[in-house]
Amino acid sequence: MPVANAQKPPPAWLMDGIGRVREGLSQIRQAVVPPNLTVFEMVQGSWLTQAMYVASKLGIFDALAGGPATADDIARRVGADPGATFRLMRALAGNSLLKQERDGRFALTRLGDALRSDAPGSMAPMLQFVGHPKHWEHWGQLLYSVQTGKTSAEMLRGMPVFEYLETDRDLAEVFNNAMTAVSAMAIETLMPAYDFSRFKTIVDVGGGHGALLAAVLQQATDAQGVLFDLPSVVAGAGSVLDAAGVSDRITVTGGSFFEAVPEGGDAYLLKTIIHDWDEDSALVILRNIRKAIDPAGTLALIEMVLPEGTAHHPGMLLDLEMLVAAGGQERTGAQYADLLARAGFRQTRVVSTAGPMSLVEAVPVHD
Ligand SMILES: C[S@@+](CC[C@H](N)C(=O)[O-])C[C@H]1O[C@@H](n2cnc3c(N)ncnc32)[C@H](O)[C@@H]1O
């Protein structure tokens, strides 16, 4: 899947300011509107997610790319029931994803347009994962995860989720495409926030299809890259690397980061890797990197670093995603510093971006 650039995000200070105003207005609303009404709206969140998923799965956002159309016309084009399609599209229009014109036809809004499969920075692949019946089932057993502290995915599939993905090509493809799409969003905000051009050999550990590494090498034009992930995953990386024009500077290596990682890099990137694993497994990965990294190298974890306390942050719900599926957790900056110290690294700084991701930078400690 090519990595398309979405609309350039505004600067971090503006995103921050808008976030604060939104938070303030939401608090005023919560103080004024009867609480049961507000809670009812929150409860409907899962219905909206599934409605968006179905529209995306059927190709309704794509079908509207050519211009407004009636629900009957769309139903015929996507092979669905006309009455039910109208009800779905009306619900999406009521939630700013579509709009209904005076003549009754539906059209894409700015938000619905971001769900076209070929929209720059499209969120369709992420929606295809979140709404996938099997993943939906994982969340349906959140109760089990909270009661036991274990992943519902393992309880339902009989093995840890990454092992399961090795056996289910359909879900694996949906998952890998989702990671690539979320990477595209994270990359947009990460690139202006951090200078990768000083590195010579950049190793992306658990780099999936290579979307992050491709963007980093486009910035670090003199650097070589190593893309490392499970063999079955890196096998699908070719089109992403080719589309970015960096294939000739990247070595693709398959293996497990629990065994060893490629040696000799002066930069090791791990984007949304450490959050997937429990404490002991995360330490094994980090210690393997500590063994492989150039003594003067830099480790960069790109994660949703949680704020201290309970301020609204998308990482808090992602933390529950880790609880039901992967078995890991999101961490605060202090928790990352502690984890890194136990693996032989010193955290040097946490760089925030205009999006929800931050970059945790660390260097190896020498005895
Ligand atoms: C949450 S995804 C992140 C992918 C990529 N870094 C990104 O941000 O798009 C986790 C990645 O870890 C990889 N992974 C899981 N177990 C692994 C292992 N034992 N060795 C290497 N990679 C592994 C998965 O295949 C997947 O690509």
Image: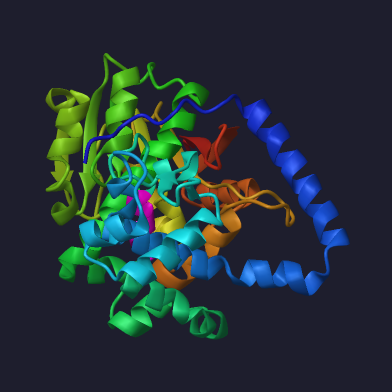
Q: Which residues are magenta?
A: 124-131
Q: Residue furthest front?
A: 103
Whether 130 is among the magenta residues is yes
Q: Quadrant of residue 330?
A: bottom right
Question: In the figure, residue 319 lies in which quadrant?
Answer: bottom right
* Residue 326 place in picture, x, y as percent: 40, 66
Q: Residue at x 53, y 52 (%)?
A: 339
- Image position, residue 321 (x, y; %): 48, 65
Q: Is residue 223 above or below residue 7?
A: above
Near-viewer residue (40 or 144): 40
Q: Residue furthest top?
A: 222
Query: In the rendering, at what x and y percent does residue 265 appear?
Result: 29, 31
For residue 269, side relative to residue 176 (left or right): right
Q: Residue at x 14, y 37 (%)?
A: 239
Does the rendering let one see residue 207? yes
Q: Main secondary structure of the magenta part?
A: helix
Q: Is residue 264 above or below residue 344?
A: above
233 horizontally vs 364: left or right: left
